[in-house]
Amino acid sequence: MPERALGTQILINSDAIAGLTSINGVSLTAETLDTTTLTSNGGYREFTGGFKDGGEVTVSGYFEPGDADGQVAVYNAFESGDAIPFSIIYPQGASWGFNGVVTGFSTSAELEGLIAFEATIKVSGKPSLNVTASSGLTNLVLSGTGGTLAPAFSAGTRYYTFEGVTANKVTVTVTGAGQTIKMFVNGAYVKDLVSGSAAEVDVKIGSTKITIMANETGKAPKIYEIIVVREEE
């Protein structure tokens, strides 16, 4: 059944781009090659498929220069010219996954308006359309001196805090049978996690963001975000 667009997100690596009001694309097109011959039936031209193109994705919204892992990361990707992993995740669980090269980045300001932001992402290679969501994690455990996870883990809860840590490391243990589980720290990929095995993460005084992405082949990823707050010892 039709679903509201509210809640749709686009991720660069594992982080949502903030402040968006519009996400347009992916737009698939295909070239054709003329295979007409002198014996083509009825004098009609005949064709076969040629190269396919994933098109461009445009995003627009409000400029948020404090969005270091989102809008600023898009700007940095424009400067580097590298193909970066992007995901468009819809509220009902479907998603697009693709590598993209940022080809445009702009801001604008008008009288009696909010400062606007817009970016263009060229899809590189084959995008994947995933129409069902991964089952996700069945458990998430963080341990570290003084730390407390809040709220208690639930498969349907995406955002958590782990406050009161006084040590310089925390241990993350995830459980998710049949999942490919990737861990990012402050937006940067760190490693793939093995279900049921512990992994240590260095944390600084202040806050550290740990992102866990669980995915099954051919399905949309489920993403969990934990803000670890380390206090002075």
Image (cartoon, rainbow, N blue to C red):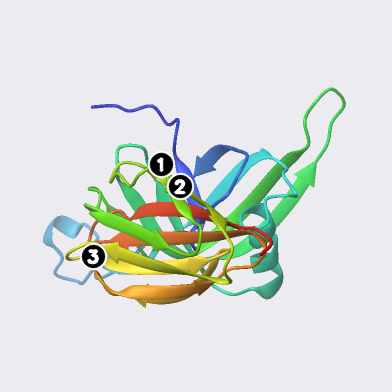
- Chain-order first, disc 1 or disc 2: 1
Q: Amino acid at mark 3?
A: Gln
- At mark 1, the secondary structure is loop
Q: Identify which residue is drawn at 51% across, 58% down.
A: 146
Residue 200 location (% of width, % of height): 45, 75
Which is in the foreground here, disc 1 or disc 3?
1
From this view, report whether residue 177 is shown above or below residue 198.
above
* Amino acid type assigned to the residue bearing label 1 in the image: Pro
State the image quarter where residue 127 is shown. Answer: bottom left
**Which residue ends up furthest to the top in the rendered image?**
112
Number of marks drawn: 3
Could one spot residue 28 in this view of the protein? no
Q: Secondary structure at mark 3?
A: loop
Q: Badge 1, how many Cα within 10 Å: few under 14, some, many 20+?
A: few
Q: Residue at x 19, y 71 (%)?
A: 38
What is the C-alpha distance between the residues marked 1 and 3?
23 Å
Residue 143, given in percent of the width and then of the height, sits at 41, 63
Residue 149: image x %, image y %? 43, 50
Q: Earlier in the sequence, mark 2 or mark 3?
A: 2
List the residue tagged with mark 1.
151
Name which residue type carries label 2.
Tyr
Q: Which residue is mark 3?
A: 179
Q: Who's the residue at 58% across and 46% down the image?
A: 59
Residue 138, can we see it? yes
Q: Quadrant of the C terminus?
A: bottom right
**Quarter residue 34 falls in:** bottom left
Give the numbered dot on residue 160.
2
What is the CA distance from the residue labelled 2 to the residue labelled 3? Answer: 20 Å
Disc 3 crowd, CA 10 A, few/some/many (<14, 14-19, 20+): many
The crowding category of the residue bearing disc 2, from other C-alpha atoms within 10 Å (few below 14, some 14 to 19, many at least 20), is some
Residues at circles 1 and 2 in contact by the CB criterion of under 8 Å: yes
In front: mark 2 or mark 3? 2
